[in-house]
Image (spheres, rainbow, N blue to C red):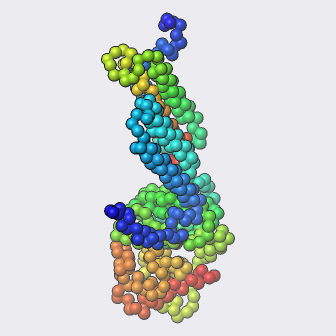
Amino acid sequence: MSDKRRKWHERLQVTLWTLIVPPTVWAVHFLFAYLWAAVSCAKTGFFAEFPTLFTAGTVLALATISLSGWIAHRQTRLRGDPPPHERGTDIDRLRFLAKSTLLLAGLSFVGVLFTALPVVFIGDCR
Amino acid sequence: MRRSVAGKFLPLWPLMLAGCNRHQSALAPFGLEARSTLSLTVVLAAGGLVIALGVAVIYAIAARAPEGRLTHERGMRLVLWLGAVFPTVVLTALLIWSLPAMRPLPATGQDLHIRVEGEQFWWRVAYREAGRDPVLSANEIRLPVGRTVVFELTATDVVHSFWIPGLAGKMDMIPGRTNRLVVKAEKPGRYRGVCAEFCGLSHALMAFDVIAMEPAAFDEWLAVARIPPRPTDSAIYHRGEMLFAREGCGSCHAARGTPSGEIGPDLTRYGERLTLGAGILAPTPGNTAAFIRDPHRFKPGARMPAYRHLRQDEALALAVWLKQSGAQEAKR
């Protein structure tokens, strides 16, 4: 199968850079949540009842993490080459990175969710 | 056979039941917030127990199973589902379920506001209603059942913490800052609150009575409390009043018909209080007299000076006067 006939996401490859996407999104979202709370509390004394911007930002973060997790998931499922992926070959490096990205994406997804829920549910600034 | 440490103390366990009571216990709620906290605690404890038992069962099966019964892949899958997915789902569900309980109850400016200031080692209380003068009191809080009440909590010296276990969670009282605690009592009765943050020598002796009343009874009590005190014409009244003035009690305490001091607890309705010295003694004339003559015996570190020079009969006369004046107020 030539590169052109593969779907766009199949052409994407996990690298050390894509590996850090999920935790980076988590970190940015975390900062965003704190800034959101600090600014809302300083300006109004409480959080907005249904903070649309915050919810949209959270959905975007979750979508980005899900996408990188899904791409990584596709690449862990390429046929052949049973585990453990510990040799210095290209395919082992790819599978290792893909698996690590997938696990990090899972962790980051839960992290973003657990950060966002209190912000959405608790409107109290104490 | 060796007995475990817990086993050795087995005969002492029933003694722990002596701690059970209904006037100061988070396990005997009389308010909305404490009730939801209790149900949350019960669900968490039961859920934790079920999970612990489940882990024990899996451990027992795993320890007995012959080696190689589980393939590496199935083992890894078990770790993924029971070790990562299951706890995540359970924790997320718990978070979503418990978050609404953490929101404060809604309150408006029309609700009764009770300002409570923590001081070493007593409570300054002011009932504030929109557009009216506050009613001052000390070491006792009365609440109408079924109505939303907003506590405004602060402190004047060190950090205290306001905790009525049967009503709601604790809330810090911080000098220079006012914290709000919104509550709703559900059952009338007599309860107790405490200071829950170490605040000095008599921290453990800093408590207060809480009386949850039917709304009509509460309204009547508050209306009576608003009426300015009228002096009574009796020998005992005049002697008490004379002693109160002579000893300079009024420079710290407000009491009916005396110039009002604001340093110590307000004694205007002392006669109707259920305890003496912020929840530590029965308010009998004998105890009151003993407290006046030597407060530090009962409350180490209290700011009130000792009045040892008072004769016992004088201290008693003062106690009876304080007791009577409040009691007359309450009856009226």
The residue closer to the viewer here, A47 or B18, is B18
Quarter residue B75 falls in? top left
> Vertically, is B14 above or below B332?
above
Residue B260 appears in view: no
Residue depicted at 52% across the width and 89% down the height: B237
User: Which residue is most to the front?
Assistant: B66
Q: Is residue B302 left or right of residue B104?
A: left
Residue depicted at 50% across the width and 43% down the height: B91
The residue closer to the viewer here, B304 or B185, is B185
Residue depicted at 63% across the width and 82% down the height: B332
Residue B173: x, y in percent? Answer: 44, 60
Residue depicted at 48% across the width and 85% down the height: B284
> Vertically, is B30 above or below A59?
below
Q: Is residue B212 left or right of residue A92?
A: right
> Vertically, is B198 above or below B293?
above
Residue B14 appears in view: yes
The residue closer to the viewer here, B189 or A34, is B189
Quarter residue A89 falls in? top left
Residue B123: x, y in percent? Answer: 46, 69
Quarter occupied by the N terminus of chain B: bottom left
The residue closer to the viewer here, B3 or B277, is B3
Quarter residue B176 falls in? bottom left
User: Which residue is most to the right?
Assistant: B216
Q: How many marks?
A: 0
